[in-house]
Image (cartoon, rainbow, N blue to C red):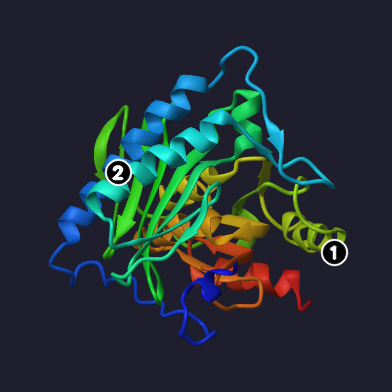
Amino acid sequence: MSWRGFWAGQPDGPFMTDRNRLEARADAAELVAVAHALADAARVQTLRHFRAAGLAADNKEAAGFDPVTVADRAAEDAMRAILRERRPEDGILGEERGAQAGSSGLTWVLDPIDGTRGYLAGTPTWGVLIALSDESGPIYGLIDQPYIGERFEGGSGQAVLAGPHGTGPIAVRAPRPLSEAILFTTFPEVGTEEERAAFGRVAAQVQLTRYGMDCYAYALLAAGQIDLVIEAGLNAYDIQAPIAVIEAAGGVVSSWEGGDASGGGRAIAASCPQILEAARDLIGPD
């Protein structure tokens, strides 16, 4: 089921770009507290299996390798148990357990381990993604890296990093030419031949390109370390939390075509509109 299709009765048009809707809610503090409780529970389950000897994975994709582990499932189950207790009226859209409709108009969009390939390989570039969305898209997002102990969150125009060096606000890098930009991606691991070629045109123009960073790339963009992330083959649960965090930190996110990326597909995240548009110009039309 598509993200837009999950919202029965809603028009299949672009989502609103105003992400300050959380601030207006009387229950905003409770919603943020629930998000942190979800992340805490997922930390326990993911760390229990990370770098464990003999960790096995099932493959969800017949034509490639899309792994899922016991940790993915356990982390999502732990988060869903909290939501059943504290927010039973809310909907849920999770990578491993699918969609569950709610009555409140809010949906928790969960990716228990974004970057399971990295998780299997022992790299600390995977993360837990938690977004809170209404019918117009994400209003709050959280990117948690349990092994490093870093938690990036964004909503209502505020972006914060809590980690080993303490807690404080984060913001994207200052604008700069594309030729001075740092670009991250999971290409060539994902994407069609044409999409990889389009990405290559951008990579040829930037100062530095790094690969295979999964959701941690979006966190680094929000924290002001890099300038650009280009991806394809995304689902709603891959991108909604990063959108909320990046936009709260002052960045921008769109589809390759310039529309809203909340439903997944092909996305560009950038520190500023100038870099995003320069990348889109190189990617070109379909």
The foreground one among 4 and 138 is 4
Q: The residue under label 1 is which amino acid type?
A: Glu
Q: Going 57% across and 66% down the picture, which residue do you hit?
A: 275
113 relative to 100, above or below: above
Q: Is residue 122 left or right of residue 171?
A: right
The foreground one among 54 and 218 is 54
Q: Going 34% across and 42% down the picture, which residue do you hit?
A: 81
Q: Going 57% across and 78% down the picture, which residue do you hit?
A: 259
- Image spot of residue 277 (x, y percent): 60, 73
Q: Secondary structure at mark 2?
A: helix
Q: The residue under label 2 is which amino acid type?
A: Ile
The dot on residue 82 is 2
User: Which residue position holds label 1?
Assistant: 194
Quarter of the picture holding the N terminus: bottom right
Q: Is residue 122 left or right of residue 197?
A: left
Q: CA distance from mark 2 to mark 1?
A: 42 Å
Q: Going 30% across and 29% down the picture, which residue do you hit?
A: 165
The dot on residue 1 is none
- Image spot of residue 80 (x, y percent): 38, 46
Q: How packed is label 1: few (under 14 Cα within 10 Å), some, or many (20 or more)?
A: few
Q: Secondary structure at mark 1?
A: helix
